[in-house]
Image: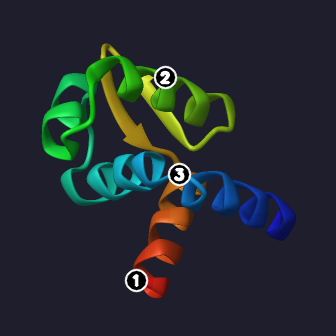
Amino acid sequence: MADDLAANMGFITGNKQRERVVQILGTKGKIAADKVSKFGHIPAPIVGKILAEMAERGLVSEENGIWGLTEAGAEIEKEIKKRG
């Protein structure tokens, strides 16, 4: 589990836009991808790609177009806050 956290942490923090998406979902809670794009000033197609990649890793989940952090995603968001 710690290995997964470290690998996913590197995946997220290695890209400022991914990090921003995690921070937005951590702050705003469950929201639509277009809102993530708006809050993060990140183009919608990029947000879509980031969310898809994060979903593959089990860091976010989507229900009826609304995205939120999973437990694993929330752990990473906490770690980012600690380091920030």
> Residue at coordinates 53% horizontally, 76% vertically from top-left?
79
- The total number of labels drawn is 3
Identify the mark nearer the N-term, 1 or 3.
3
Secondary-structure class at tag 2: helix
Point out which mark residue 15 bears: 3
Q: CA distance from mark 1 to mark 3?
A: 15 Å
Mark 3–mark 2 Cα distance, whole angstroms, equals 13 Å
| Residue 62 versus residue 26 in the image, above or below | above
> At 37% from the left edge and 29% from the top edge, which residue is drawn?
47
- For disc 2, the marked residue is 49
- 12 or 57: which is nearer to us? 12
Q: Position of residue 81 (x, y in %)?
A: 40, 78
Question: Looking at the picture, how far across and down is residue 27, in whole percent?
Answer: 23, 60
Q: Would you name the residue on which mark 1 appears?
A: 84
Residue shown at the point (36%, 17%) measured from the top left:
45
Q: Is residue 40 above or below residue 10?
A: above
Q: Quadrant of the C terminus?
A: bottom left
1 or 3: mark nearer the eye: 3
- Residue closer to the observer: 35 or 13: 13
Is disc 3 placed on a helix, strand or loop? loop
Does 45 sit left or right of 80 as displayed?
left
